[in-house]
Image (spheres, rainbow, N blue to C red):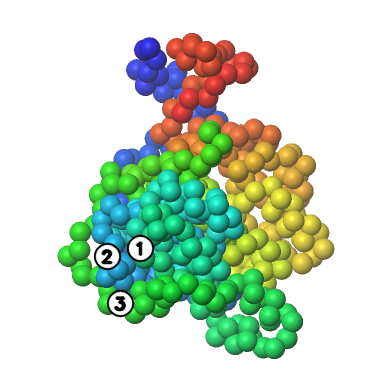
Amino acid sequence: MSIPNPSEHSSPLAHRPWLAAYADGVPADIDPVDQTLVDMLSASVDRYRKDVALEFFGRTTTYGELGEQVERVANGLRKQGVVAGDRVALVLPNCPQHVVAFYAILRLGAIVVEHNPLYTARELRHQFEVHGAVAAIVWDKVADTIAEMPSDVRPRTIVSVRMPDALPLGKRLALQLPVPAARETRTAMTAKPTAKKLVAWKTLTAARPLARKTAKPTLDDIALLQLTSGTTGTPKAAILSHRNLRSNAAQGRAWVPGLKEGAETFYAVLPLFHAYGLTLCLTFAVSIGARIVLFPRFDVDAVVAAAKHSPPTFLPAVPPVYDALARAAAHRRIDLRSIRFAISGAMSLPIPTVTRWEEASEGLLVEGYGMTESSPVALGNPIGPTRRPGTVGVPFPSTEIRVVDPDDPSIDRAVGEAGELLI
């Protein structure tokens, strides 16, 4: 079946009428990207070397330190036998080790496979059966679960990560206190695996930096296998290249013309193992040299504490997060006016949530839409007066859409009629 190509029209507005709704300064198209995600990180390391890249409960990591840690862990993985093209599973909450591991895997030309660390043993086993990773970098609380997988599924190398090792010294020491609060926090953050032959994370970080001549991936190499069950009910792996992910970060940058490179603070309250959190906080934020404040899970108290010394300027989140923070602002626990950009996704954004947030923050809250397969953001509300609450907005730059008859995709639906969305 032949499907018309809208790009054959002579006028951009003839086939992309949504361009008229774009905020001032947003281009119709982005330039083709020429950086892999590895090149993107290197550029930010060079440009923002002394600036903070990561913050975790008050402990900071500069871009220069991040770059060196990535090179060390990449070499550590190489010594464990990981080579270009291998699949390496990440089963981690949001923490600095997650960010380092993500880019270290890519530095080798290997492929990241992200997982929810709260999944059951059965769910994780099925996912490992799907992708067949040769190595896994995992939270110590799930290390035994991975190690107990059948031999034909279990990765040959399992790296165990202690999340408290990334905390400031004072907080690490406080976790050892023989008091109920410390024991509760310690139990939530870490465990002692019983499995044998686990590789400690510090073994990777102790390696020398990778040799400069080590080959890097290309734009069309696979960067990520992102598991999603959105269209089938059982997880499948969407295949995303460096070009896919770098392009989406560039589209996001174009969508927000008021961003100040090297001066934004992103709050990573979304899980990095999900395509939404990964793109906004692992790639987009790094591409502009932002400070990324990491939270293992969303907790109002933790956000309030962090905001006292590192006020957020960019918050990608979901509606319940915005509701919770707006309530905190109503009780004067937090000042939200530093947040210039608030983007909601992953679920429908109720208009009452928009109203509460905008009254508390004095800024806009806009909704977007995407799919894992589209790497992932495809549409968004303009960050400006043309936004329309209650909708997912209009296509991103360099994005073509059609709304068609589900039974015959060669037939476009008229404006105002329901249909199937093609991206």
Residue sitting nearer the eye, 293 or 24: 293
- Direction from residue 136 to residue 216 in the image, left or right: left
Whether the residues at callouts 2 and 1 have beta carbons within 8 Å, the answer is yes
- Is residue 396 at least partly visible in the picture? yes
Whether the residues at callouts 3 and 1 have beta carbons within 8 Å, the answer is no
Question: Quick one: label 3 or label 2, which is nearer the N terminus?
Answer: 2
- Looking at the rendered structure, the secondary structure element under dot 2 is loop
Q: Which mark is residue 340?
A: none
Q: Quadrant of residue 31?
A: top left
- Pointer 3 local density, CA inside 10 Å: few below 14, some 14–19, many at least 20: some
Query: What's the residue type where badge 2 is placed?
Result: Gly
Residue sitting nearer the eye, 86 or 288: 86
Which residue corresponds to mark 2?
81
- Looking at the rendered structure, the secondary structure element under dot 1 is loop
Q: Position of residue 158 (x, y in %)?
A: 41, 66
Mark 2 to mark 1: distance in Å? 9 Å
Which residue is found at the position 69% from the left and 54% from the top?
321
Q: Which mark is residue 156?
A: 1
Q: Position of residue 32 (x, y in %)?
A: 31, 40
Residue projecting furthest to the left: 213
Mark 3 to mark 2: distance in Å? 14 Å
Which residue corresponds to mark 3?
207
Q: Position of residue 73 (x, y in %)?
A: 34, 70
- Pointer 1 local density, CA inside 10 Å: few below 14, some 14–19, many at least 20: some
Question: Quick one: label 2 or label 1, which is nearer the N terminus?
Answer: 2
Query: What's the residue type where badge 1 is placed?
Result: Arg
- Pointer 2 local density, CA inside 10 Å: few below 14, some 14–19, many at least 20: few
- Looking at the rendered structure, the secondary structure element under dot 3 is loop
Q: Quadrant of residue 178?
A: bottom right
Residue 200 in the image: above or below residue 295: below
